[in-house]
Image (tube, rainbow, N blue to C red):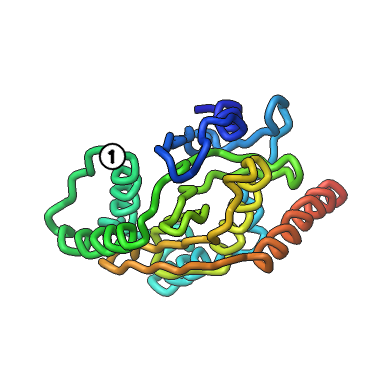
Amino acid sequence: MTLSDTLNQLRSGTWQSLDEQFEQMRGGGRPRDGKYYIEGTSERVPAVTTINSCLHPRGLFHWHHSNGAAGRDFNDGGTPALEVGTLVHRMVDKHIHGEKLPAVPDEIVGLVESSFGAFLRWWTANGFKVIATEVPLVSKKHKVGGTPDAILLDAEGRVCLGDWKSSNALYSDYLRQIAMYGAMWNEVAPERLQLTGGFHLVRFAKTDGDFEHRHFPELDDALEMFLLLRRAYDLNKILEKRIK
């Protein structure tokens, strides 16, 4: 599904009531080439994650530090471990779309069952329905693009944004990221699909069976900080041209 198709669905009157039968929108996911463009033009805009990297992400900083402490090159991940979190993330995507779950290696079955089971209990307890998943969005206002994991309806009828992370910790750059995702969604969504239930940030530990959930009713300060970084990104481009 292209961005144009998604926007047309959003603007159509398909859903007379969010309490009626859902017609889930499944977007095309993140662009394979990682590039976002203003709809109908050839104007490329940076990704949310690119803007966020104007500040060195704490998770990446920790990774570089760990490599240095182990005597490896700072970009060397060492011998890859079987990542529980990455697999659970895939399982969540499959579960949401009613697809067959991927096979789980025997050596991590217990850890995966712990993390994925915790997710299922949380998901069921909140009575979530899926409005849309992996819809690539581009803000004409702020000239930035990104793809949130899911837009949800909770048991109280509130529209929420859900984002899943495979990580050993939660970091502030995640808040800036999902805050901007929310702003981009609200920019294109009709009034009945505007975010009213806040943000659900879910973490699956990379190599353990840990599951963590945080809910943020609003992220105004995170959005404000992101937009400052967006401006800094443009200013840095100007400075780079001057110094050449």
Specify few, some or many for label 1: CA neighbours under 10 Å numbering under 14, 14-19, or 20 or more: few
Image coordinates of residue 190 in percent, x first then y, are 63, 41
Residue in view at x 22 percent, y 65 percent? 114
Image coordinates of residue 144 in percent, x first then y, are 68, 45
Q: Nearer the viewer, residue 128 or 204?
A: 128
Residue found at the very far right of the displayed protein:
242
Residue found at the very far left of the displayed protein:
106
6 w.r.t. 131: above or below: above
Image coordinates of residue 32 in percent, x first then y, are 50, 34
- Left of 55 or right of it: where is 9? left
Residue in view at x 26 percent, y 66 percent? 209
Image coordinates of residue 235 in percent, x first then y, are 82, 54
Q: Is residue 79 visible?
A: no
Residue in view at x 68 percent, y 68 percent? 221
Q: Nearer the viewer, residue 55 or 162?
A: 162
Question: Which residue does the numbered mark 1 point to in the structure image?
Answer: 98
Amino acid, disc 1: Gly
Q: Quadrant of residue 67?
A: bottom left
Q: Quadrant of residue 117?
A: bottom left
Name the secondary structure under disc 1: loop
- Left of 28 or right of it: where is 4? right
Q: Quadrant of residue 122?
A: bottom left
